[in-house]
């Protein structure tokens, strides 16, 4: 395929959409495309020099007259400069607000018919799509994009229902770098964290926001703990951390819950974990599920949003109704107490990542889309 010049914009420091955008940038660069990252700061996963990847920071000046800094205008301005200076063929923006709206403005400003690909990630539709102050601009940006993708079928359906765009939305699933997220030896963690080999390790990783329903995680674990020797590893940080600490204290299970904070060694943590819990009330995909599955960890999640597209119920994990911690803990115990089932689910989880969420195939899908919408000078 012809090598392209691709602009990528995402949130650089928060969440899975930035992670997916940055990992996509790296894999496209490895394939020889020239990638131009246009963001407010360097994405945290772009932590060293990568050949073929160039970074264009967006800077906004502060003036007394501004009540709010006009970041969106500065972003559109920068995008339009990069389109013209670098002769971009495609601009791929992750998360509709404000990135897709800015891309449309930037294209207009540049006067160049650059292809715009918008990828919807979740709350840009499921939360912001309900906001009357924003949903008109989201619809406009989708209609003006050359192509719009969504990270799950569930999110594509939600978008059609909520936003009613004129354009079709193609699902392109998220992926992980399988070279990083793979099962590996991490026995040193037992000593480092003071864990014992005869207990089951249940892990939850998130940004500890309300949608993650941390109290359900603690309640489910408490029910697991009543039946089997286990520890809950909580990795990540966010506004609901105090709620989690309170729930753990209330349940009196402080000895069995470890608050690990933000971690750089997730593949190692997954490699020693037996089960992952993700009991969110909203989740368009659940990238953390894929990261765990890629390391061979079976998952129990809620049957909402895109989670049932990632966890194949009864094949590599289970999905339980939202808020039903009895069912979630029963499924968890079934996996933890049956070694044969655990082994089968673990192998199926890794197979699923290899076959259904294979990074090579997913990058192929994005490349095919770019080829359809690219503008050639
Ligand atoms: O809105 C958020 O929760 C943050 C957003 C992000 O930027 O990480 O998460 C969404 O995008 C991820 C990557 O596609 C998905 O894995 C998450 O499921 C999705 N979050 C929600 O839908 C709540």
Image: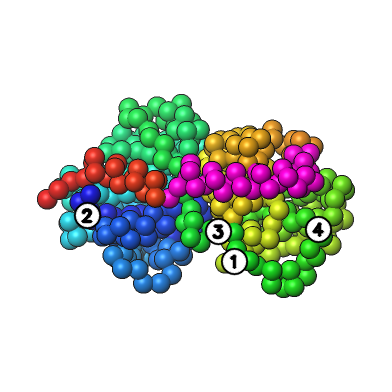
**What's drawn in magenta, residue-wise?**
330-359
Looking at mark 3, is its residue's CB closer than 8 Å to ligand 1?
no
Give SS at disc 3.
loop
Front: mark 3 or 1: 3
Residue 199 is labelled as: 4
Mark 4 / mark 3, whichever is N-terminal: 3
CA gap, disc 3 and disc 1: 12 Å
286 relative position to 61: left or right: right
Front in this rendered view, residue 28 or 106: 28
Asked whether 354 falls inside the magenta stretch, the response is yes
State yes or no: discs 4 and 3 in contact (Cβ < 8 Å): no
State yes or no: discs 1 and 4 in contact (Cβ < 8 Å): no
* 156 versus 7 height, above or below: above
Front in this rendered view, residue 344 or 84: 344
- Mark 4, residues whose alpha carbon is within 10 Å: few (<14), some, or many (≥20)? few
At a point 23% along the width and 49% down the height, the residue shown is 1
97 relative position to 232: left or right: left
Mark 1 / mark 4, whichever is N-terminal: 4
Asked whether 338 falls inside the magenta stretch, the response is yes
Mark 3 / mark 1, whichever is N-terminal: 3
58 relative position to 280: left or right: left
Task: Please tell me whether the stretch drawn in magenta is mainly helix, strand or loop.
Answer: helix
Where residue 51 appears, as percent x and y from the top left, is 31, 68
Q: Which residue is mark 1?
A: 265
251 relative position to 168: left or right: right
């Amino acid at each position: 395929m012809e090598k392209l010049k691709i602009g990528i914009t995402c949130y650089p420091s928060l969440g899975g959409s930035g992670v997916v955008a940055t990992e996509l940038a790296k894999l496209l660069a490895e394939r020889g495309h020239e990638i131009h990252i246009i963001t407010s700061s360097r994405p945290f996963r772009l932590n060293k020099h990568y050949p073929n990847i160039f970074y264009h920071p967006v800077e906004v000046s502060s003036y007394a007259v501004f009540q709010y800094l006009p970041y969106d205008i500065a972003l559109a301005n920068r995008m339009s400069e990069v389109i013209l200076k670098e002769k971009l063929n495609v601009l791929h923006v992750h998360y509709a607000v404000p990135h897709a709206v800015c891309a449309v403005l930037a294209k207009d400003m540049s006067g160049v018919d650059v292809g715009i690909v918008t990828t919807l990630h979740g709350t840009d539709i499921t939360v912001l799509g309900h906001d009357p102050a924003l949903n008109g601009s989201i619809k406009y940006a989708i209609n003006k994009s050359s192509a719009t993708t969504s990270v799950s079928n569930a999110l594509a359906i939600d978008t059609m229902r909520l936003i009613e765009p004129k354009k079709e939305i193609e699902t392109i699933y998220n992926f992980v770098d399988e070279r990083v997220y793979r099962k590996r030896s991490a026995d040193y963690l037992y000593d480092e964290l003071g864990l014992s080999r005869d207990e089951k390790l249940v892990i939850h990783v998130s940004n500890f926001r309300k949608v993650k329903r941390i109290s359900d995680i603690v309640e489910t674990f408490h029910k697991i703990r009543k039946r089997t020797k286990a520890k809950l590893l909580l990795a990540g940080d966010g506004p609901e951390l105090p709620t989690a600490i309170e729930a753990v204290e209330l349940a009196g299970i402080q000895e069995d819950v470890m608050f690990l904070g933000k971690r750089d060694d997730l593949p190692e943590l997954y490699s020693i974990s037996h089960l992952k819990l993700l009991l969110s009330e909203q989740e368009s995909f659940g990238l953390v599920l894929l990261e765990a599955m890629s390391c061979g960890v079976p998952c129990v999640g809620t049957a909402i949003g895109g989670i049932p597209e990632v966890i194949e119920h009864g094949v590599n994990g289970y999905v339980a109704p939202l808020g039903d911690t009895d069912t979630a803990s029963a499924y968890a115990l079934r996996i933890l107490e049956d070694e044969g089932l655990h082994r089968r689910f673990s192998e199926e989880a890794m197979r699923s990542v290899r076959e259904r969420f294979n990074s090579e195939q997913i990058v192929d899908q994005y490349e095919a889309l770019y080829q359809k919408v690219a503008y050639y000078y």
